[in-house]
Amino acid sequence: MASSATIKAIESSTVHQIQSGQVIVDLCSVAKELVENSFDAGATSIDVRFKNQGLDSIEVQDNGSGIASHNYESIALKHYTSKLTSYDDLSELQTFGFRGEALSSLCALSRFAVVTCTAQDVPRATRLEFETSGKLKSTSVVSGQRGTTVIVEDLFHNLPVRRRELERNIKREWGKVINLLNQYACVQTGVKFTVSQQPTKGKRMVLFSTKGNPTTRENIINVFGVKTMNALILMDLKLELTPTAGPLSKGKARAGGSAAEVRVLGHVSRPAHGEGRQTPDRQMFYVNGRPCGLPQFAKVFNEVYRSYNASQSPFIFADIQLDTHLYDVNVSPDKRTILLHDQGQMLDNLRESLIELFETQDVTIPVSQA
Ligand code: ADP
Ligand code: MG
């Protein structure tokens, strides 16, 4: 382009679309954002419904708080959130959401609607429709129970290249989204979590559901079956971290230089369970109950496990519990990447503790016989 071309601002609707495409990148991001909003709303029942594996629609219905009418105008506006009040709160974050970007992004990238009802309004629910900018377009009264249903149809209909990619890769995308929902269903105790799918022609089928169980053990049984559970051992590892100076500990963490404790709680395959090969996608990691990808942790688990049982990958359900000052979730818009302070020390410690755990199991087979 000629150097004399005038530099102009991009139209705000285009900027909105570009930025939205960074928050909502695929089916997984839609499911994740909607399910997390339902958890944040205190739901004890969450129903995730796909039509045509999400290509036609994704609906998430919950029995949470509902949305009060004075918030209708703002829920889909960019950077409007009811969850975070100041930047300091980021380090103390207890809710999943805090960026106020998900609903606004979905408005820009799909045919989007919300049906919501607070306890006071039952049985009068309100259906809300929005412009692509996130501005409220219309409201109408419908009948409903307490809670919120978010409806996302024709994802990426206005981004043809992204839409074609989604359709082309739908098999892989579908596998990923089901794994992610497994991950939420297993970790959330006290929540009835149901996932169903309806093909374009045919009946809706429930893919899996949990029953509002008090323990993750029962959740795992609901999702993966009792046979899988019987092949697992309970894990409760305590990793002692000696204090080091680091960017995330600045001033706040571990005042006085005391050692921090990290717990790794969950379930892992017995070193020899003989149940046939477990697929690696049954490896679920969390930080304080927040599902996330922790490839370095997975690597340690797999390496240690293989030194006891070289023929199989382990099933892993591991919740890393630690002080909120020891990590940062604000790294990527999808919040799945988590920056852990002192990860190297944690991993060394984890390796030792896992070996200790497996050593005390009497069912191990030496590598030579595996
Ligand atoms: P964030 O979750 O970061 O606040 P979102 O765009 O996901 O941003 O949601 C915007 C706001 O809409 C939330 O802060 C919340 O007040 C409201 N909201 C969204 N989903 C639900 C839901 N399922 N139940 C109740 N309120 C909701
Ligand atoms: Mg949210």
Image (cartoon, helix red, strand yellow):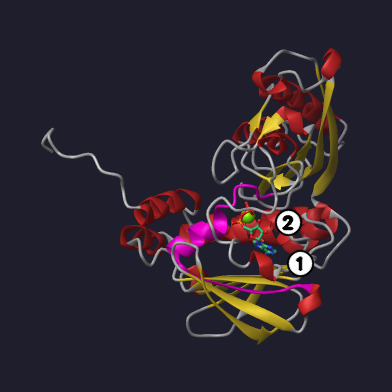
Q: Quadrant of ligand 1?
A: bottom right
Above or below — where is 272 with respect to 276?
above
What amino acid does circle 1 point to?
A: Gly
Task: Give residue 165's mark.
Answer: none
Specify the amino acid type for callout 2: Asp
Q: Is residue 321 visible?
A: yes
* Marks 2 and 1 close (CB-CB < 8 Å): yes
Q: Residue 110, relative to residue 201: is it above or below?
A: above
Q: Does label 2 point to a residue whose CB lies under 8 Å from ligand 1?
A: yes
Residue at mark 1: 64
Q: Name the side, left or right, on which 42 lies relative to 179.
A: right
Camera-side residue of 113 and 121: 121
Q: What residue sits right under mark 2 in the picture? A: 40
Mark 2 to mark 1 CA distance (whole Å): 8 Å
Q: Nearer the viewer, residue 178 or 233?
A: 178
- Residue appearing at x 76%, y 78% in the figure: 121
Measuring 44% from the left and 71% from the top, which residue is drawn there? 154
Is residue 12 toward the left or the right of residue 4 in the image?
Answer: right
- Is 178 placed left or right of 123 in the picture? left
From the image, which quarter does the C terminus lie in? top right
Q: Please tell me which residue is depicted at 65% across the width and 59% down the height of the picture.
A: 181
Residue 55: x %, y % from top left: 46, 69
Magenta segment, which residues? 96-118
Q: Name the foreground residue: 98 vs 225.
A: 98
**The N terminus lies in quadrant:** top left
Toward which corner of the image does residue 186 lie, by quadrant? bottom right
Q: Is residue 290 above or below residue 326?
A: below
Q: Is mark 1 within 8 Å of ligand 1?
A: yes
Q: What kind of element bears circle 1?
A: loop
Q: Is residue 277 magenta?
A: no
